[in-house]
Image (cartoon, rainbow, N blue to C red):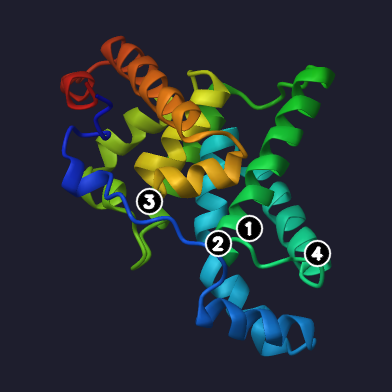
Amino acid sequence: MAQPLLGNPGALSILAGAQTGVSEEDSRILRGLRAGIEQAYEELIAQYEQPVYGLVFRLLGNQPDACDVVQEVFIKVFRGVQSFREQSSLRTWIYRIAVNEAHNHRRWFVRHCRHEVSMESDREEQDSFLERATDPGQSPFEQALNSENRTLIERALKEINPVFRTAVVLRDIQNLSYEEIAEILQVSLGTVKSRILRGREALRRELTQQPGAGLAEAVA
């Protein structure tokens, strides 16, 4: 059976029931966006900008690219709000856009073979992000791990297959339910669980190759 990132189901992988349709709060924000009310745009950004950035950064592992992708995500959200059919939660819809944009950016990156950022500067960017991403909405993952261990796990995440990385990030860091992840990725629940299991196994293998590897057992 798949285990959450630190082997503690209660701490890191609380299975919330699947949410269908939008909440009353979602509806209120959507009405404001569709009416062109500036406060609604500000509220959406305040609520989702940092979690979306955290998701995209972990999928891409590069700060400048993550910033560019997040800008594109919110442009698409604002342009698409009129056609959003409200069959999923607002968060699920935004995260689906974010995952798709991150994957599109990665494919573009691979096609153009662009790798201009040195490992040292990339590490500095990552450490800087980890230090400033301490908002009140931290996930249980962020709360449970100290800064040094977070850095080790973040680096190991960058080395595993992007398909599995996405599932692990959504489940164990963003703390989404299996149903929400299936909705975001547009795959079956069985596929979601398989990807999470394989992602955790790959992450553990990466961590065994790093110093201070008590973390490898933690994700077993």
Residue at (55% x, 61% y) in the render = 91
Q: Amino acid at mark 1?
A: Ile
Q: CA distance from mark 1 to mark 3?
A: 25 Å
**In the rendered image, which quarter contains the N terminus?**
top left
Q: Amino acid at mark 2?
A: Arg
Q: Helix or strand or loop: what does disc 2 sit on? A: helix
* Vertical order, 176 against 205 (above or below): below
- Nearer the observer: mark 4 or 3; the answer is 4
Q: Amino acid at mark 3?
A: Glu
* Vertical order, 136 against 28 (above or below): above
Q: CA distance from mark 4 to mark 3?
A: 33 Å
Residue at which label 1 appears:
94
Tell me the quarter of the picture where residue 218 sits. Answer: top left
Q: Residues within 10 Å of mark 4 (few under 14, many from 20)?
A: few
Q: Amino acid at mark 4?
A: Gly
Residue 131: assigned label: 3
In terms of sequence position, does the residue under pointer 1 or pointer 4 come before the other? 4
Q: Residues within 10 Å of mark 3 (few under 14, many from 20)?
A: few
